[in-house]
Amino acid sequence: MSKTLQAIRGMNDVLPEQSPLWRYFEHKVAGVLDSYGYQQIRMPVVEFTELFRRSIGEVTDIVEKEMYTFDDRNGDSLTLRPEGTASCVRAVMEHGLINNGLVQKLWYTGPMFRHERPQKGRYRQFHQVGVEVFNLPGPDIDAELILMTWRLWHALGIADSVTLELNSLGTSESRAAYRAALVDYLSGHFEQLDEDSQRRLSSNPLRVLDSKDATTQAILVAAPRLEDYLDEDSRSHFAGVRARLDAAGVPYVLNNRLVRGLDYYSKTVFEWTTDKLGAQGTVCGGGRYDALVEQMGGKPTTGVGFAMGVERLLLMLETLEKVPAELQQQVDVYFCAFGEKAELAAVHWAERIRDAIPSLRLQVNAGGGSFKSQFKKADRSTAAYALILGEDELNNHSIGLKPLRNDTEQQTLALDDLTGYLDALFATATRSHA
């Protein structure tokens, strides 16, 4: 096949057998967020490039190296969104949703785009679930975001395989004092730093703390600590977050090297990490960004949020074998019909069943075929039961119900009793699909 007729490297198709797991995950996420009173917002995939330059910053890897940017036919510079926070902030500002101190608790999901080297768990088109909250400055909302994710991990069955890492970045003033001390210290070890850290020392020194280079990490052991530079308000805020997590029984570890590379972040930052995915260990990250709205031209407005990587979490579910078995079954009942009259009757009865039991997944055989060929298709459909309707059944106003996944005997039911019987049969079935 021609290369131009293949998917772009790092941008993947989600095939039919994979879609049920995506729907399952999305259903779980929506259920948790709905239960906390969050509302969904949907933003465009493409934005003006200036939005990300202003919010993320010119001197960042995202803007310098990773964005998909192009000029449209009007000559405007547009960019496929590399993250969701900037788009969400733009939307609430544009539509006045945060004017006069209005509280907004929002969530979104969808694809993001970054030109990175594709690897397992990291793609050029990747999907995130994001949550953003505006005009709530206290530690209670920071804790609520963490509690929501904790509840989601339990709902997915992965709570024992993730670790919450927590830190406070303080205010921009206290962080500036720390940055100066860190640069002063690292400058004395400049030659020993890895190449990325040398570059970041002048442009984004806090990101040096993220370095995975062993030599750089050894140098950082004796580096100044951010917590020693925190102002009193930030200390009090962080204590409030921790007290609420302690009250809810959420375990966490303090990580004083957990930072964000963008200046608008302040106070609480957190990450959920795992050791089950190799190098791609962060599955969710968040923090407070009280300066972002003002940085983008709005009035001072507090904000806090998080984003989680969908592909990584799905990979985690598969790795830990936490994919529900029922997701493998895509059809409940497969309707086999033999002969023209039976095929017409099958259409009638299938629609009656769907009217009576909307949640039932019913597939009607298409294209005719022999008994053997139709039962082969029924088996491949993953259905639990097959309905059998032929000339004899029509003459007797009856229908056959054959179990496909066990050795139970086939039953003969009166057609008039069919919908009631199926309703009772599947009433206790657990539905995981949306």
Image (spheres, helix red, strand yellow):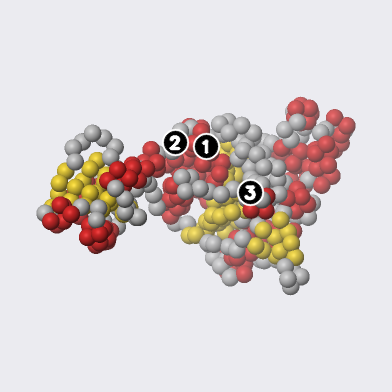
- For the residue carrying disc 1, how many other residues have a C-alpha within 10 Å: few (<14), some (14-19), or many (20+)? many
Q: Residue furthest bottom?
A: 74
Q: Is residue 236 shown above or below 193?
A: below
Tell me the element at label 3: loop
Residue type highlighted by circle 2: Lys
On the image, the x and y values in percent for residue 129 come to 54, 51
What residue does disc 3 label?
1
Residue 337 image offset from top left, x and y in percent: 26, 53
Q: How far apart are marks 3 and 2 (CA)?
A: 36 Å
Discs 3, 1 touching: Cβ within 8 Å: no
Residue 395: assigned label: none
Q: Amino acid type of disc 1?
A: Met
Residue at coordinates 84% horizontally, 44% vertically from top-left? 202
On the picture, is 280 further left or further right than 149?
Answer: right
Circle nearer the N terminus (2, 1): 1
Q: Residues within 10 Å of mark 2 (few under 14, many from 20)?
A: few
**SS class of the residue under badge 1?**
helix
**Residue in the foreground of this view, choosing between 35 and 180:** 35
Q: How many labels does the image show?
A: 3
Q: Using the image, tell me which numbered label, if any, was put on residue 322.
A: 2
Residue 227, percent across and down?
69, 38
Q: Distance between the residues labelled 3 and 1?
A: 32 Å
Distance between mark 2 and mark 1 Cα atoms: 8 Å
Q: Which of 237 and 289 is in front in this view?
A: 289
The residue under label 1 is 316
Residue sitting at 59 percent across and 54 percent down?
111
Q: Can the viewer see residue 166 in this picture?
A: no
* Amino acid type, residue under disc 3 in the picture: Met
Against 282, is 354 above or below? below
